[in-house]
Structures are given as C-alpha cells and as structure tokens.
Amino acid sequence: MSSTRSIHWATAMKEIQADRAKRPAGLLAAQGLIRATSAKRRPLVVAGTYDKATIMVAAIAAARVHQDRTGSTWGEALSVALKATWALAKAARATTAH
C-alpha cells in the first residue's frame, strides 16, 4: 500500500507569502531610533557607497536599545537592528543616486 500526500498549492503559497510579509518585532522602532541618531552622526551613505563602519555603529546602538526594551537575546536584537539599518542605508543610497 503506497501512501500519497496531497498538497493544496494555493494554501501553500499563501502560507509562504504570510511568512515573508512578517516584520521582526521592533523593526520600525529600530528604524526610528537609527534615523534620529544617525542625523547627529555620520551618514550611512557617503558619495554613493555604504559606510559600513557607521552602519555597524548605528546597528549596535539600536540593538542595545532594542534588547533593553524587549528583553531579547543579543543575536535577535542585532539581527533586527542590522535589518533596519541596512534598509535605511539602501533607501538613502537610492535617493542619492537619482
């Protein structure tokens, strides 16, 4: 007797899409914090190139605040902060390229 498994592709695709659409907890708060503090420091993009040192400094500062607020692990906090920082850097580079 062979066993078969049926897959409902519409349901599977909706589940995949739902997984991708989720934002990590605290992502928007981290972006707000980075926007507020990076204006006082060096820009994330200089002459069309990413300033990786500045991106890392901003992400670490945001990760500390995120970890204090949420009680998450350092790895989770840094992950959220880096995603937020890189998103802002990419947006800044896109606006300066035009």
Image (cartoon, grey):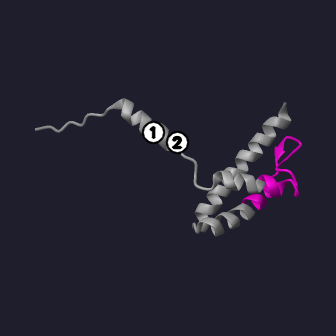
77 or 45, which lies in front?
Answer: 77
Numbered circle sitting on residue 50: none
| Mark 2: amino acid | Arg
Across and down, in percent, residue 68 comes to: 65, 69
Quadrant assignment for the N terminus: top left
Based on the displayed image, in which of its 4 quarters is residue 42 positioned? bottom right
Question: From mark 1 to mark 2, how far is it between C-alphas?
Answer: 6 Å
Residue located farthest toward the left when viewing the structure as drawn: 1
Q: Which residue is mark 2?
A: 20
Picture quadrant of residue 94: top right
User: Dot 1 corresponds to which residue?
Assistant: 16
Residue 16 sits in quarter: top left
**Magenta-colored stretch includes residue 95:** no
Q: Amino acid at mark 1?
A: Ile
Identify the magenta region.
35-59
Q: Sort mark 2 into few (<14), some (14-19) or many (20+) by Cα contacts within 10 Å.
A: few
Q: Secondary structure at mark 1?
A: helix
98 w.r.t. 57: above or below: above
